[in-house]
Amino acid sequence: MPNSVVGLGPAKFLRVPGEAVIGAAVLPALPRRPRVALAVVSGVLLAGMTVLNLLDMGFNQYLGRPFNPVLDWSLLGDAQSYLEDSLGRTATLAATAGVVVLVLLLTVLLALSLVRLSNLLARHSGAATRGTLIAGVVWITCSSLGLQMAGVPIASDRTAAALRVQARRVSDTLKDEAEFRKVARVDAFGNTPGSQLVPDLRGKDMIFTFIESYGRSAIEDPIMAPGVDKTLDARTKVLAKAGFHAKSGWLTSATYGGSSWLGHSTTMSGLWISNQQRYRTVMASDHMSLTDAFKRTGAFDTVGVMPGVQKGWPEQKWYGLDKVYNAFQLGYKGPKFSWSTMPDQYALQQYQERVHSKKPADGRSRMSLLILTSSHQPWAPIPKMVGWDQLGDGSIFKGIQAAGNDPADVIADTTKSRQEYGKTIQYSVTALTEWLKRYGSDDTVLVFLGDHQPIARVSGNHASRDVPVAIVAKDPKVLDKVADWGWTDGLRPAHDAPVWKMSAFRDRFLTAYGSTPHPKKG
């Protein structure tokens, strides 16, 4: 069995497994009780490896990486929540029950099958010995000569190799945990006094915004790109008429297809946070986030608007946010759009009414962190722009949601998924830039970017991990500070615009706007 969906094919199953040959040689030679015990253990082990293989297939398909047996079990709960939001509670419970039953059946049936097979071999020892010798000779010959069928080696040791890979993955994870703790304690700006952080942005209305699943594929894929590129170019012109100008480039995300919080924290920490263990390590540390840098100046009130957060969020402390508005604190009375709790336009209007329109009482400036959610999969139904003065409590979206596509129909159709994904990116970019045109001031500085590429079914099996990033402002001095970055003018980065690792952004941004490094060493 391959560990990726694209690797599936008849040739993968027309092979001679070396582990089966060894088992056929060993099992008949054992007394009955040890033979049955070994057969049961082997069946359970084979079932476990099959489950891990299936998890690898799913993770490679959705997140562009294999399953990590140390870190990724917690993500299965997130996957269940996503299904419930997308397909409903009944369908999710049925699917969950089906998976549990399937795993149990797989374990029991494989164990019983191996017990039966071992007993059969023992009863017919002569035929079993001859068959095992023939299979062994075939395996050795095919392995020595490198014989293949449809590009697949006939001699297989796939299960043993997969077991070695899983063991090495566990070992590497544990080793990475210790090494990353040391890396996280080092910070080029860790001891920088607040007075020396972002002095060139004092007095600015600073906004950082992440757009869900906004990746390079949206701008370059032949199905999604025409609509998205047209929207980006049109919004660039609209903003220019309002006095705003932009520069854009590319960042390589630390995650792919999901786990957005890894992209958020990588951008803000300047560290490569590519798994859950690294995330937990950083969240428990005093490593300075980019948003916390503004808080440390003492010159900024710091606020987060998180319509995707529906439970306790202790990360608020690490991000240095004085106040956070979650999904239940924005007054929304309209329908959910699958996973997304509310349309981006509504979240932005609430940000305007509750935060942006109100100056801090102590005369400070403000730094805001916004996480937009409308472009989260399954990209159905999709909200539409309505009049800003018609948003109210969000009830206006009931008709739009009811008339939208069924998530199950979009999930099942790759082409439709790609088309609808492109539409959601257009919606999110339009909502954000319309808000900026409507409410932005001479002092507003907007940095917006994607957190990761969409899943492989949409972005392709060999897509990059790049996401677009843009800085938008009216004040020409703001963009002059990054003139040497080589970024493209406008909201749509050129194909050959510079590509940095997402973890490089924090230090480059701090340096560009006048921050003085004072390293903190581990």
Image (cartoon, rainbow, N blue to C red):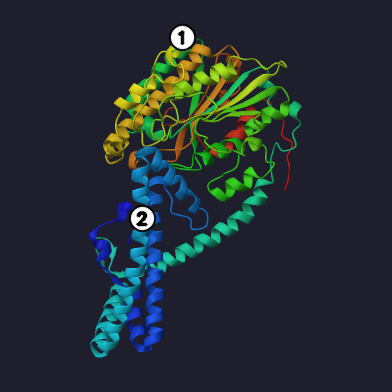
Total numbered labels placed on residues in the image: 2
Residue 99's label in the rendered image is 2
491 over 100 or under it: above or below:
above
Circle nearer the N terminus (1, 2): 2
Q: Nearer the viewer, mark 1 or mark 2?
A: 2
Residue shown at the point (71%, 15%) measured from the top left: 363
For the residue pair 276 and 345, the one nearer the viewer reads as 345
Residue 368 is left or right of residue 2, and the answer is right
Q: Are marks 1 and 2 in contact (CB under 8 Å)?
A: no
**Crowd band around label 2 with a 10 angstrom C-alpha radius: few (<14), some (14–19), many (20+):** few
Residue shown at the point (70%, 18%) measured from the top left: 364
Residue picked out by circle 1: 241
Disc 1 element: helix
Please provide percent x and percent y for residue 231: 37, 21
- Say which amino acid is labelled 2: Val
Residue 426 is left or right of residue 119, and the answer is right
For the residue pair 427 and 96, the one nearer the viewer reads as 96
